[in-house]
């Protein structure tokens, strides 16, 4: 895709799953990729396996100080951040009335405050250079709701609202801000949440018009497009990648 070669891309939660696929795609497009994750060993391993100059950096998105430190490390090793992909996420599926405040806090810290902290850490440099692309991974749960994911859906909906407002504020600086919303996707997190429930996977496949769960690579293509020059006139938008499960 146009405009990705030699760009410095920071992808959070990139040691595995969707984040890993996104990082791999950017590296294949010639970008210089920082694999950011709370799992230092996993980040380093993924960077090594991807190759092409990718580096691993440790970032705990729930701690703004650690976010700034991780971004600084990425900049020192690769250069100023041209593109940020907010991918790190976490969920615990349970009825809201059975959930606890400690779970709410963790879900909000990772899925809402985390991306906000990451944006803040890279934004001044993007504004100064009058260029940048920010793509945040939300969820279709944040667009249409999802039983058992009330707080998660609220946090992910918050990312949509935050991104739309940010897109309006920074457009004057040549910065594009967009959101990608996965539907059910075959990731390690999905396996953890579902407990390997094959009946759940089968029922989801029946409900999805394209007849399968999403794969991490399905998201990677969408993110790469929105970060490319091909999407230069797209900002403030929310793209569902769900195989047609949601169409509104």
Image: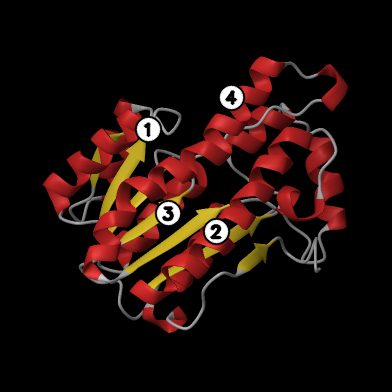
Measured in 3D between alpha carbons, the distance from the residue under mark 4 to the one under mark 1, in whole angstroms, is: 14 Å
Q: Residue at x 72, y 41 (%)?
A: 154
Of labels 4 and 2, earlier in sequence is 4
* Element at label 3: strand
The spot of residue 31 in percent (x, y) is 26, 64
Q: Which residue is mark 1?
A: 64
User: For numbered disc 2, what is the local secondary structure?
Assistant: helix
For marks 2 and 1, the one nearer the N-term is: 1
Which residue in the structure is indicated by mark 4? Answer: 106
Label for residue 163?
2
Number of numbered discs on residues: 4
Q: What separation in Å lies between label 3 and label 4 (alpha carbons)?
A: 20 Å
Q: Mark 1 or mark 4, which is nearer the start of the sequence?
A: 1
Q: Nearer the viewer, residue 213 or 94?
A: 94
Quarter of the figure that contains the C terminus: bottom right
Query: Tag 4's secondary structure?
Result: helix
Pointer 3: residues within 10 angstroms few (<14), some, or many (20+)? many
Which mark is in front, 3 or 4?
4
Task: Tell me the CA gap for discs 3 and 1.
Answer: 16 Å
Mark seen at residue 85:
3
Q: Residues within 10 Å of mark 4 (few under 14, many from 20)?
A: some
- Quadrant location of residue 36? top left
Give me the C-alpha separation between circle 4 and circle 2.
Answer: 21 Å
Residue 159 screen position, x and y as percent: 59, 50
């Amino acid at each position: 895709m146009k405009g990705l070669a030699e760009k410095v891309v920071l992808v959070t939660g990139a040691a595995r799953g969707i984040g890993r696929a996104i990082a791999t795609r950017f590296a294949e497009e010639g970008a210089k990729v920082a694999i950011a994750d709370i799992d230092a060993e996993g980040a380093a391993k993924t960077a090594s396996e991807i190759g092409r100059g990718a580096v691993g950096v440790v970032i705990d998105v729930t701690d703004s100080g650690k976010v700034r430190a991780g971004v600084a490390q990425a900049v020192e090793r690769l250069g100023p951040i041209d593109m940020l992909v907010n991918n790190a996420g976490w969920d615990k599926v349970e009825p809201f009335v059975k959930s606890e405040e400690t779970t709410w806090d963790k879900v909000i810290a990772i899925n809402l405050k985390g991306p906000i902290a990451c944006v803040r850490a890279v934004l001044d440099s993007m504004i100064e250079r009058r260029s940048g692309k920010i793509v945040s991974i939300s969820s279709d749960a944040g667009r249409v709701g999802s039983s058992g994911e009330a707080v998660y859906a609220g946090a992910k909906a918050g990312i949509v609202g935050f991104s739309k407002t940010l897109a309006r504020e920074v457009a004057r600086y040549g910065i594009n801000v967009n959101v990608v919303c996965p539907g059910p996707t075959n990731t390690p997190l999905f396996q953890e949440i579902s407990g390997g429930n094959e009946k759940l996977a089968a029922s989801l496949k029946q409900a999805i018009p394209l007849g399968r769960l999403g794969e991490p690579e399905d998201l990677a293509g969408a993110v790469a497009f929105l970060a490319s020059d091909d999407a230069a006139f797209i900002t403030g938008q929310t793209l569902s990648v769900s195989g047609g499960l949601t169409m509104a």
